[in-house]
Amino acid sequence: MKILVTGGAGYFGSVLVPELLRAGHSVTVLDSLLYGGTGLLQNFGNRNFRFIRGDVRDEPVLRQAADEADVIIHLAAIVGYQACRKDERLAEEVNLGGTRNVAAAASSGQTVIFASTGSNYGAVDGVCTEETPLQPLSVYGRTKTEAEHLLLQSCPVVAYRFATAFGISPRLRLDLMINDFVYQALKTKNLIVYEKNFRRTFIHVCDMARAIRFALDHLPEMRGQVYNVGGDSMNLTKEDVARKLREKVEFYLHFAEVGKDEDQRNYEVSYKKIRDLGFDVTISLDEGLDELIRGMQVVQVTNPYSNVYF
Ligand SMILES: NC(=O)c1ccc[n+]([C@@H]2O[C@H](COP(=O)([O-])OP(=O)(O)OC[C@H]3O[C@@H](n4cnc5c(N)ncnc54)[C@H](O)[C@@H]3O)[C@@H](O)[C@H]2O)c1
């Protein structure tokens, strides 16, 4: 297939794109390179790979990039509650405006696979299914919710509400909870966890890529539908994750009774709908932690005002 991946240079795209190329697809990435393009370097030796440096807010560029695609995988976004809060207008323009352009560029013969998010649920008692009302708590969640709605109304789409990713990627993100916990445990030997009983749900970034390939293989039955994508065994509290990590690494772990997490998401998700179609995750928290612990050896974040580097 010919596939356009918007935002393909990001944390997820850097894992997904080589996987699509390995599967024999032709892949075009459209990305504005907000965080650089290092994650894409591995692909340039492949003749089936094409890169366009561009912005999803630029409709003619997007339309041209999408022209010959069979499938558009729409990842480009301002991602996470912190990044969106920093520049709400940009988040609105990219997450919603960019998605509006994707919907306008997609012709009736093309399918859009949209990377939506479990953040759309917010704080929910009980277990979220795809029918649970969406009550996003952040600009990120709200713009992703509206973007998902817009796509479902206007073009053939598979909307994947992904759990929170973890694991190593060539464009690593340390603002993701598990990745951040491992970084702090290893580099500062110190982790303070607020609101330890908050429930979160996780998926390894390689399983996210597998889920996309699964959709490509099942487009006729999946088109027009929303799916939660993750694993039931990875609905965990923050305390569960921290204690599991503590079994592997020596560090000072403190569960704070005072203070609160700015990220107030607290929810559990059912993944039955996609599991019934035949997809399940393969990489456990245990394996993902081991990978992160090994991989963090090469991660160095320096503070120019410090004499000490972790
Ligand atoms: N990582 C997760 O935990 C997670 C979970 C659920 C959903 N998602 C979704 O998956 C997608 C990818 O997330 P990620 O973790 O790779 O984030 P990321 O921030 O690493 O990647 C986003 C990419 O989009 C690009 N981009 C941003 N604005 C752009 C614009 N205007 N035009 C073109 N490109 C632009 C950036 O340069 C970057 O390469 C997002 O849509 C996100 O909402 C991610």
Image (cartoon, helix red, strand yellow):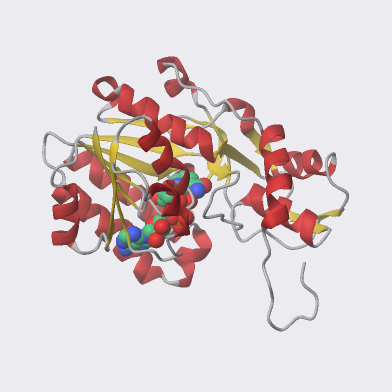
91 over 75 or under it: above or below: below
**Residue 257 horizontal side relative to residue 206, left or right:** right
Report the quarter where the C terminus lies.
bottom right
Up-down relation of residue 91 to residue 283 (above or below):
below
Q: Quadrant of the N terminus?
A: top left
Residue 249, x across and y down, in percent: 84, 46
In which quadrant of the rendered view does residue 37 lie?
Answer: bottom left
Eyeballing the image, is 11 above or below 274?
below
Vertical placement of residue 308 versus 39, above or below: below
- Residue 182's spot in the image, x, y percent? 72, 51
What x and y, as percent, mark residue 308?
80, 75
The answer to whether any part of residue 76 appears in the image is yes
Q: Residue at x 29, y 57 (%)?
A: 96
Q: Nearer the viewer, residue 303 or 262?
A: 303
Query: Residue shown at 61%/57% (left/top)?
Result: 174
Describe residue 87's horizontal placement relative to residue 247 as left or right. left
Depth check: give the residue in front, 276 or 180.
180
- Splitting the image into 4 quarters, where does residue 286 fall? top right
